[in-house]
Image (cartoon, rainbow, N blue to C red):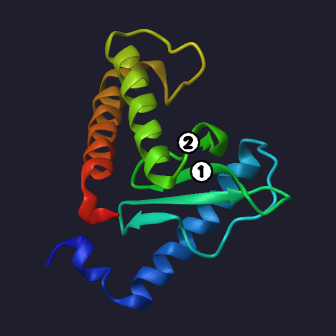
Amino acid sequence: MSDSDQYDDPELRAAWLSAQRQHVTEYLKEQRVPYGSVPTEPGWDVAPYVAVWPILGASGAPQYWVIVGDLPADFVPADTTHSVRDAVRAFARRWETVAQYMLRGESHPTISIGKPSDASDLGDLLLTRARTLAEFADQDNLW
């Protein structure tokens, strides 16, 4: 049985999603991102690997998308993406770009991940996550 098969259990999945939602709120506070609320359910997930949450503004409309799970937490503005699937594609593109910088031994102009001494290892890991996200976004059966 794979890890994801275990998460077919509604109670296990609900506990994982609750922990991920908590991670979202902590991440937004840590990043000092103003927001209205975080819904109880994500916009999309593949438990226990990734969950993407709509972050609602004061109007109740999505303001940001936040990604968490077995990957770096990150967010993109909702006004630059039309759906959660578009947000996943945006994360994949961003991470691939950042990973390429890291693998070249260069600093990305706006995003840093980890210590410079770990750039090669983290760049490989980030590139793998970016490619996996891009594959997820292309798989209609996941949506």
**Can you say whether 25 is above or below 90 in the image?**
below
**Can you say whether 9 is above or below 91 in the image?**
below
Q: Pointers 2 and 1 in contact (CB under 8 A)?
A: yes
- Quarter of the picture containing the N terminus is bottom left
- Quarter of the picture containing the C terminus is bottom left
> Which residue is labeled 1 in the image?
65
Out of 141 and 39, give the one closest to the viewer. 141
Q: Nearer the viewer, mark 2 or mark 1?
A: 2
Out of 51 and 18, give the one closest to the viewer. 51
Amino acid type for the residue under numbered disc 1: Trp
**Image point (76%, 51%), residue name:** 29
Kind of element beneath mark 2: loop
How far is mark 2 from mark 1, CA to CA?
9 Å
Q: Is residue 95 left or right of residue 141?
A: right
Q: Pointer 1: residues within 10 angstroms few (<14), some, or many (20+)?
A: many
Task: Count every numbered label the image shows and give the total.
Answer: 2
Residue 16 screen position, x and y as percent:
46, 75
> Which residue is labeled 2 in the image?
81
Out of 120 and 93, give the one closest to the viewer. 93
Amino acid type for the residue under numbered disc 2: Thr
Q: Pointer 2: residues within 10 angstroms few (<14), some, or many (20+)?
A: some
Outermost residue on the front side: it is 82
